[in-house]
Amino acid sequence: MSHSDIWSTLQVPPPLRPGATVAVAAPAGPAHADRIEAGLGLLGQRYDVRAAEDLFAADGYLAGSDDRRADELNGYLRDPDVRAIFAARGGYGSMRILDRLDADALRADPKPIVGFSDVTALLSWSAVAAGVCGVHGPVVTQLGELPTDDVQWLFDLLEGTRPTEPLAEGLSDSDNASGSGSGKAFAGPLTGGNLAMISHLLGTPYAVPTEGAVLVLEDIGERPYQLDRYITHLQLAGVFDTVAGVALGDFTRCDEPPGPRPVPDAFAVLQERLDAAGVPWLRGLPVGHGTRNRAFRFGARPVRP
């Protein structure tokens, strides 16, 4: 199936109901108990939360072995009682288990995987391998640190009571909203997520689908030259020949520290690279590792009420 066909065939999982069973998994980096407690509490106020005893397993920079993380996620994908799967945190490790995951189980019983950052790999896997919309939204460690409006937005989206197009509404309340000089309007299914992960997935069976889509980009801790490298990689791979446009979220801690020579800041680099690629873009989306993270359905075409 080509990426252009994905948008018309993606399944949107049934809406969650308050009190539904949801699972918290650690598919990437180790989940630290002190950072996750508030998020688990918020989920527990609304849903019946299930988590494995070894949720806090750690093996260096991973939440346990690849077998542990894949088995945990597959268990929830195959469990008919679990109606959504929330990632405990990002970090690194999701792409190591993509070829171990049970796409047939998810296709037969669609349920949203919720997360961002490194979990961009799982959201793309869900769309490409299983044909199911995940939700690009807060991981559990971030959930307790967000404004109440963003938390409620996520619950409303999952429960089917948030039809408003998140791109437009998110920009309307952002002081930094701005766009490319071309002034070209664009629209399409929302896709994307973490810029580094999108770059690393190119050339794999799980590359983020982009054709005709609005490509949302965010990142953390990547220096300007690294952002340049990722955007240039996407350009050389032809990604910007297929997208409807690019929407930039937060690029947290991505500016170069002060030094003897002036260096362009993160957004200056992104603007120069996107303009050179000839792709329309805008910035100011409250999405990413900053103080805001508005959820959106990965691959779903936004609708207005």
Image (tube, rainbow, N blue to C red):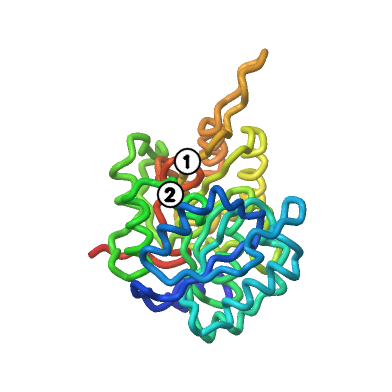
For the N terminus, the quadrant is: bottom right
Image position of 257 (left or right of 131): right
For the C terminus, the quadrant is: bottom left
Q: Amino acid at mark 2?
A: Asn
Q: Position of residue 289 (x, y in %)?
A: 51, 44
Image position of 248 (left or right of 305): right
Q: Quadrant for residue 207, please give it.
A: bottom right
The mark found on residue 290 in the picture is 1
Q: Amino acid at mark 1?
A: Gly
The residue carrying pointer 1 sits among few (fewer than 14), some (14 to 19) or many (20 or more) residues within 10 Å by Cα, namely: some
Q: Quadrant for residue 165, please give it.
A: bottom left
Q: In the depicted view, which residue is nearer to us: 167 or 105?
A: 105
Return the residue found at the far top: 260
Q: Quadrant for residue 220, please give it.
A: top right
Q: Please name the residue that numbered disc 2 is placed on.
A: 293
Q: In the depicted view, which residue is nearer to us: 95 or 159?
A: 159
**Placement of 291 over or under 94, stated as above or below:** above
Work out whether residue 97 can be spotted: yes
The residue carrying pointer 2 sits among few (fewer than 14), some (14 to 19) or many (20 or more) residues within 10 Å by Cα, namely: many
Q: In the depicted view, which residue is nearer to us: 201 or 61?
A: 61
Tag 2's secondary structure?
loop
Give the CA distance from mark 1 to mark 2. 7 Å
Q: Do the CB atoms of the residues marked 1 and 2 lie less than 8 Å apart? A: yes
Q: Position of residue 200 (x, y in %)?
A: 68, 54
Tag 1's secondary structure?
loop
What residue is drawn where x is 44% and y is 50%?
144
Q: Position of residue 163 (x, y in %)?
A: 29, 65
